[in-house]
Amino acid sequence: MSFNKDIRNFPRTFWIANTMELFERWAYYGMFTVLSIYLTDPVSKGGLGFTQEQRGIMQGVVTGILYLLPVIGGAIADRFGFRKVLLAAFVTLISGYFAMGQFHQYAPVFAAFLIIAVGGAIFKPIIVGTVAKTTNKSNETVGFGIFYMIVNIGGFIGPWAASKMRDINWQYVFMMCAAVIGINLILLFFYREPQRKAQTGSIGKALKEIVSNTVAIFIDLKFVFFLLIIVGFWTMYMQLFFTVPIFIAQWVDTTVIYNKLGILQPVFGYVEENKGIIRPEMMINIPALTIILFQLIISSFLKRTRPVSSIIGGIFVTAIGLGQLYFHTSGWLIALSLVIFAFGEMASSPRIQEYISTIAPREKVALYMGYSFLPISGGNFLGGLLSGNLYGSLSDKYNLLRGYLAENNIQLPADARTTDDALLFNQSMEKLNLSSTDLTQLLYQTYQPGKIWLIFAGIGLATGVLLFIYNRFVLNNNR
């Protein structure tokens, strides 16, 4: 009865804000879960043909900036009003998504992605602020629970929709994202500014205050150590989006899953080269679906567990799930690994802010929690750079193929070494008289590209150990 009463008591703006969040997450994850493949797929297959290193730099820098800017976006919204700044955010996002589908050179694509990051950074604090201002102490737990569920629903729908759009043409993915944000422009007509404390002073004054708060945070070296440690978790976690999609596309046999789907094959599968497959974006939707189904159960189960114990245990489970990718190329076992990964995420990620609230000075809890985005930014930046460099040198199928041809002195036509990657692969199949599957298995057995997952799992395990040491010996904390 209490839950139903809470639902009825939420004002219209609460539901409008949550619906906006659903469409924004739909657009962002629709783009982001296919981005690694789009950037690096050979041009002959519809991709942009960038190197793994170029991809890593773009993803690391832009997503790092995305999680640095919300504090500035929040300051702007407080002074100009949520509604006006939301309008600016949506126009920015639509422009960025549309432009990203039109450009094919590295610099313009980079710039368009950066525009999306700016729009997203403006949007984030306004929606969270709206949810906070349209709930109260009696229903805020339910309100933010609904918000978290909406985030995951949007994150689940987006990749599925993007997969169907790229069946038609890659440009349709970005057009879909722009169109979905366009729906938010319509919803803005029904959005009512929530009550908020009027802010006075210039943006410059607000930025000076932000700098002052940042300095105050960095003086607390114990808290800085915590932020640095948690960078390791986000570095590992972000590989779900940076690296897993490419690894699945290049090395994993998802036909075994497609063949079991029956009448659902057209819904979740795709026929490529006369073979049914499950695309990477559908596979990495498995954690989102797992979270939608089990987050409330896991949260209830762990509510009496100390935050630090939950975080450390969750990090270890996440690392185990990611490390399992080293051992398997079967679609079913990869799917199981991603489920394990999701259970680790459910135990760790939601409780990081709760832990911050226990270690922050009592009078500065809100300030400290506001800086929980810093390790996310750092993890995105470092995770992107590591993904590009490590995958390019250890795991990229086309780079490994070129190395195999050179090591075995296998001669192809003079222009083969500089040709499109997919064409090179086809020429190599003909030269070696191997099928696509056989050549892929040959390269996998020769070079073991899955060893990249031991590195990222190692980063996660090291993070868990360092957090235990930090909590026990640096803070002398038993919470």
Image: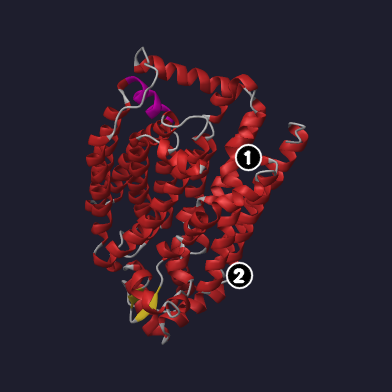
Q: Which of marks 2 and 1 is nearer the N terminus?
A: 1
Asked whether residue 83 is drawn in magenta, I would say no
* Segment tinted magenta in the rendering: 71-79
Q: Which amino acid does label 1 sit on?
A: Ile
Relative side of 58 to 1, left or right: left
Residue depicted at 72% across the width and 37% down the height: 470
- Classified by dominant secondary structure, the portion drawn in magenta counts as helix
User: Which of the two residues, 446 or 176, is positioned nearer the viewer here?
Assistant: 176
The location of residue 244, given as percent across then percent down, is 48, 60
For the question of whether residue 412 can be seen, the reply is no
Circle 2 residues within 10 Å: few <14, some 14–19, many ≥20: some
The location of residue 416, given as percent across then percent down, is 34, 72
Asked whether residue 78 is drawn in magenta, I would say yes
The location of residue 246, given as percent across then percent down, is 44, 62
Relative side of 48 to 150, left or right: left
In this picture the colour scheme is secondary structure
Circle 1 residues within 10 Å: few <14, some 14–19, many ≥20: some
Residue depicted at 46% across the width and 38% down the height: 6
454 w.r.t. 476: above or below: below
Tell me the tag on residue 364: none
Task: Name the residue tied to disc 1.
Answer: 229
Task: Name the residue tied to disc 2.
Answer: 327
Q: How many marks?
A: 2
467 w.r.t. 287: above or below: above
The location of residue 82, given as percent across then percent down, is 32, 28
User: Which of the two residues, 329 or 353, is positioned nearer the viewer here?
Assistant: 353
User: Which of the two residues, 193 or 115, is positioned nearer the viewer here?
Assistant: 193
